[in-house]
Amino acid sequence: MKNKIIPDFGPLKGVRVLCAGSLIAMPHAAGLLADFGAEVIAIERPGVGDTYRGMAPFARNDGQAVSASWAQDARNRLSLTLELDLKVPEIKEIFFGLIKKSDIFMENMVWTEKFGLFDEELLEANPKLVIVHVSGYGRPQFGGLPEVADRASYDIIGQAYSGSLWLNGDPDRPPTVSKPWTNDYISGLNAAIGALAAYVHAQKTGQGQAVDVAQFEAMARMTADNIVSYTAAGLTRARTGTKAAAFQPYGLFETEDDRYVALGVFGPAVYNRCLSAMGLDAEYFNFNDCSSSIESVSSPKGRELDSKITEWCRARTAGEIVETLNQAKVGCAQVNTPAEVIDDPHWLGRGDIIEYVDQTLGRKIKAFGVAPKMSLTPGEVWRGAPALGQDTEVILSKLLGFDRAKMAALREKKLI
């Protein structure tokens, strides 16, 4: 990469990502690439910045405050302040100058045409460019109803429209929204996968292209057999709370010390090991292929088993349950709080709790590390989340050759 600004590391070193938009899904996708070495330049409005900067709760230090969400998710990015209105000649010069020097452009502004952004012009300027659009309902160029594609969306909207919200929660209560911002983060994963797949294609063929990520589709892809159950089996899945519909033990169970443990069992071998560890009669509770049948949950004997498991857990501490069942090779974990995971030796041993200096606070914070792990080209965090516009001058000078006088004129016009 010419005129690189960030350190070399990870499998994506040399890849430059330009992104514009706010809040979670698209910036999260860019952040995932940044964790593995991509140089990510985030365009933010002067004096305003990404809306995510204003999301509570806040961490504070010496009169400075930063959104805890921003501090976690915006690390490794470069912040360029720029009014993104391509009808202004100076802005168009900057934006297209950066497009020509970028490999990937990501946006989630939805109504891009009003800013003067058109895929055809971007690909004309940079034929190998990968363009990633992230929106609630997808862009009309990829199909669907234009009036629906034009709708606004947030995480909860995508969960509802995708059908996933219908599946979550207890059967006798309204559906439960999956937290925190699950649809946004899943959409971000889709955007990252799409960006990298298109980038590989561009490197092989020289052909760039547009990638369209719709929040509702990203979430719908995570609903397992929801569609096939209805179309092929005539079944509309019902909410089952933390329980599974066709096998047990599975779900959350309260413990003697007022904690919860998650227990997951599937398949005859694990089922038998679990009941043996609990001192329960696997022959008496033998449901066809053991744990996997509707009968194992809904029959009188199935409900009796659930009652026995509930009693067994309530008579023991969370630590005792986890130790007993994991010794028997049965999946079980206590429901952790942040206070517990930051000192957990397994988390610490895998480098999942790290420290870095937040650029707004000017002090170290503890945050979640980089995942997944890689044996040869691991990701890393080279810098905390940027202060607003922190990198504007270095980007314009190093990448576009702007001198101080030109940048001062742009600042005077409040364009950067």
Image: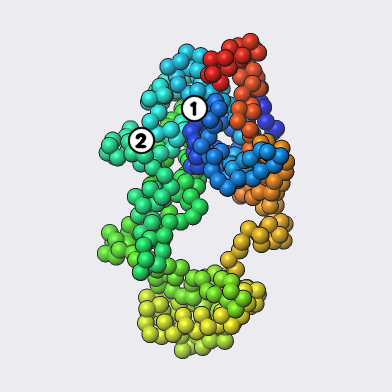
Q: Is residue 129 visible?
A: yes
Indicate left or right for 250 with 113 as reference: right
Discs 1/2, front: 2
Query: Which color scheme does this rendered protein use?
Result: rainbow
Which three-letter amino acid code belongs to the residue tagged 1? Leu
Callout 1 crowding tier (Cα within 10 Å): few <14, some 14–19, many ≥20? many
Question: For the residue labelled by badge 2, is the local secondary structure a helix, a strand or a loop?
Answer: loop
Q: Residue at x 33, y 39 (%)?
A: 151
Pinpoint residue 64: horizontal percent, then vertical percent.
66, 38
Query: Which residue is more in the foreground, 64 or 161?
Result: 64
- Residue nearer the viewer, 72 or 102: 72
Residue 72 position, x and y percent, is 61, 45
Amino acid on which the number 2 mark rests in the picture: Arg
From the viewer's perspective, is residue 337 above or below residue 321? Answer: above
The residue depicted at 66 percent of the width and 26 percent of the height is 4
Label 1 with label 2: CB-CB less than 8 Å: no
The numbered mark at residue 50 is none
Query: Which quarter of the figure is the C terminus placed in?
Result: top right
Along the horizontal axis of the image, is 100 left or right of 161?
Answer: right
Residue under pointer 2:
139
Q: Could you say where residue 54 lies in the image, as x and y percent from the top left?
A: 54, 39
Position of residue 44 relative to residue 55, above or below, is above
N-term-proximal mark, 1 vs 2: 1
Q: Can you say whether 271 is above or below 196 in the image?
A: below
Residue 359 picture quarter? top right
Which of the 4 image quarters holds residue 349? Answer: bottom right
Q: Which residue is mark 1?
A: 129
Residue 404 lies in what quarter of the image? Answer: top right
Which residue occupies 54% across, 75% down?
254
C-alpha separation, residue under disc 1 versus residue under disc 2: 18 Å
- Residue 102 seen anywhere in this rendered image of the structure: no
